[in-house]
Image (spheres, rainbow, N blue to C red):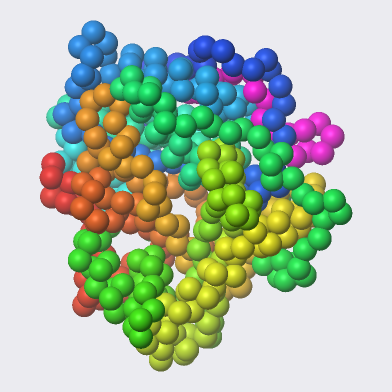
């Protein structure tokens, strides 16, 4: 791969060098890590996070930021050794598997021609489109460090979804930052993918046939995208979240913040879809780690891999229009509750077992069944904690490099200030963007450098 300057947008990113970081320290001998059934539900999408740091200067004056990051990454990969492997198809089944051979992670360095405060953080299409090196399929982990003229930096982390989900990647970033600051490690990653094996014989409820579908990587890369999707970043103040939660928590029933937030989005959504659609859907990603093992909620606490399912709620446009916010929040709660049991996850694992070989995906994510928005809650995802020795970030969130999506996405992350505010990374059609930004509640505030105190 050659490094070329990116000139899309208002500034230029010049790529300086690339290198490969391999795990150091004791690691297992090369072996094949077979993916779990829930890994096959990941879609092999690239997952990218970006963190912004102001006036970055490493606490250890003896080493540069780049050098210290590479050194601590090498140590972290010794604990997350599958992340330094290769993901290739099995010769017999054609299913992806991880070859743990310490191929390494790709590390890229770049220089931007502008300052952080000059960036348009709201318009991610403009801010980051073309500013990241294209995904290199040979490396399931790719890190890009971009230096800005003001001394600030962007660090982007891109993972192949087959490696894990948000919980797995948050563990990786936490351990990396602990190692970088020479802190005691707070956990040990669990790479036993066989913990999510199917039952013998596999059994499942027939309703799974209505929700999930077998597909190929070609199907995923060619998802039907009927309309333009815009990538936007928003700030949501803690007072707005509290107000929504209070609005939907009536008669002694307290809804969660994400349930209240989702109810608000669903109400806005029905204003922003074509008149020809009589129904619409919302989806929520649900982590099964605390649910699959029944009473032993911590059995999979440090499990590295994918352990997600998706809850889907469907309603008529008229129903959502006429319903109160509290009633819509009840619909959200009921939909999510259907996938929070051990039975659901065991049935899902078995459904995949019966439909192998190949990849699986929710029909909603593939864009089947009408307009839909999927909400991903990252309330436990580390932001302020991701300190590599040069201070906490002012921003940490998700950025999608995916070109085609069959569904709108809203990803929630805690604000870096720890004041209860949220950062929302959204991928939505223009009418939905307009509806959110024109709503009198002013919940979604376009992200600016002022929000980040730049």
Number of marks: 0
Q: Which residue lies furthest to the front in this view?
A: 295
Residue 196 seen from this side: yes
Q: Identify whether 362 is placed above or below 113.
A: below
The front one of 122 and 141 is 141
Q: In which quarter of the image is residue 259?
A: bottom left
Identity of the residue drawn at 50% across and 49% down: 403
Residue 43 seen from this side: no
Identity of the residue drawn at 13% across and 41% down: 454
Task: Report the side of 439 relative to 30 (left or right).
Answer: left
Identity of the residue drawn at 26% across and 24% down: 389
Identity of the residue drawn at 63% across and 55% down: 294
Q: Give percent across and percent down for residue 81.
A: 57, 24
Q: Give percent across and percent down for residue 360.
A: 69, 53
Q: Identify whether 386 is placed above or below 75.
A: below
Q: Give percent across and percent down for residue 201.
A: 86, 54
Residue 20 within the magenta-colored segment of the rendering: no
Q: Range of the magenta residues? A: 89-108
Task: Report the side of 245 relative to 192 (left or right).
Answer: left
Task: Report the side of 118 relative to 303 (left or right).
Answer: left
Residue 103 within the magenta-colored segment of the rendering: yes
Q: Give percent across and percent down for residue 325.
A: 36, 82
The front one of 305 and 192 is 192
Q: In which quarter of the image is residue 252?
A: bottom left
């Amino acid at each position: 791969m050659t490094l070329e300057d990116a000139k899309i947008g208002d500034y230029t990113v010049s790529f300086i060098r690339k290198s490969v970081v391999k795990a150091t320290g004791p690691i297992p001998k090369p072996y094949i890590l077979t993916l779990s059934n829930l890994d096959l539900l990941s879609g092999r999408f690239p997952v990218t996070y970006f963190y912004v740091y102001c006036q970055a200067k490493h606490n250890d004056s003896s080493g540069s930021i780049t050098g210290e990051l590479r050194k601590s990454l090498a140590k972290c990969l010794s604990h997350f050794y599958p992340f330094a492997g290769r993901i290739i198809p099995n010769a017999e089944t054609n299913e992806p598997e991880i070859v743990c051979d310490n191929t390494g992670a790709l590390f890229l360095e770049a220089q931007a021609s502008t300052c952080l405060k000059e960036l348009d953080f709201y318009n991610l299409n403009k801010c980051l489109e073309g500013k990241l090196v294209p995904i290199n399929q040979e490396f399931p982990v790719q890190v890009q460090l971009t230096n800005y003229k003001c001394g600030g930096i962007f660090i982007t982390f891109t993972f192949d979804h087959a490696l894990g989900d948000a919980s797995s990647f948050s563990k990786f970033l936490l351990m990396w930052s602990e190692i970088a600051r020479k802190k005691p490690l707070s956990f040990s990653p669990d790479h036993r993918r066989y913990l999510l094996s199917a039952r013998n014989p596999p059994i499942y409820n027939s309703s799974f046939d209505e929700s999930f579908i077998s597909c190929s990587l070609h199907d995923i890369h060619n998802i039907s995208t009927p309309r333009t999707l815009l990538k936007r970043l928003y700030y949501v103040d803690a007072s707005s979240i509290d107000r929504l939660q209070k609005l939907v928590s009536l008669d002694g029933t307290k809804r969660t913040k994400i349930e209240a937030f989702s109810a608000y989005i669903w109400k806005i959504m029905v204003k922003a879809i074509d008149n020809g659609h009589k129904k619409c859907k919302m989806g929520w990603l649900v982590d099964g780690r605390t649910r699959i093992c029944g009473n032993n909620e911590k059995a999979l606490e440090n499990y590295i891999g994918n352990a997600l399912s998706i809850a889907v709620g469907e309603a008529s446009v008229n129903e959502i229009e006429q319903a109160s916010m509290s009633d819509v929040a009840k619909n959200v709660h009921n939909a999510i509750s259907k996938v929070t049991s051990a039975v659901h996850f065991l049935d899902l694992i078995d459904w995949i077992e019966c439909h192998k070989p190949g990849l699986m995906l929710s029909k909603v994510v593939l864009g089947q069944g009408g307009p839909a928005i999927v909400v991903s809650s990252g309330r436990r995802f580390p932001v302020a904690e991701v300190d590599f020795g040069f201070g906490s970030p002012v921003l940490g969130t998700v950025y999608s490099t995916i070109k085609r999506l069959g569904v709108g996405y809203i990803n929630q992350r805690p604000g870096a200030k720890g004041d209860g505010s949220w950062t929302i990374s959204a991928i939505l059609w223009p009418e939905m963007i307009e509806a959110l930004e024109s709503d009198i509640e002013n919940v979604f505030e376009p992200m600016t450098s002022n929000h980040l105190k730049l």
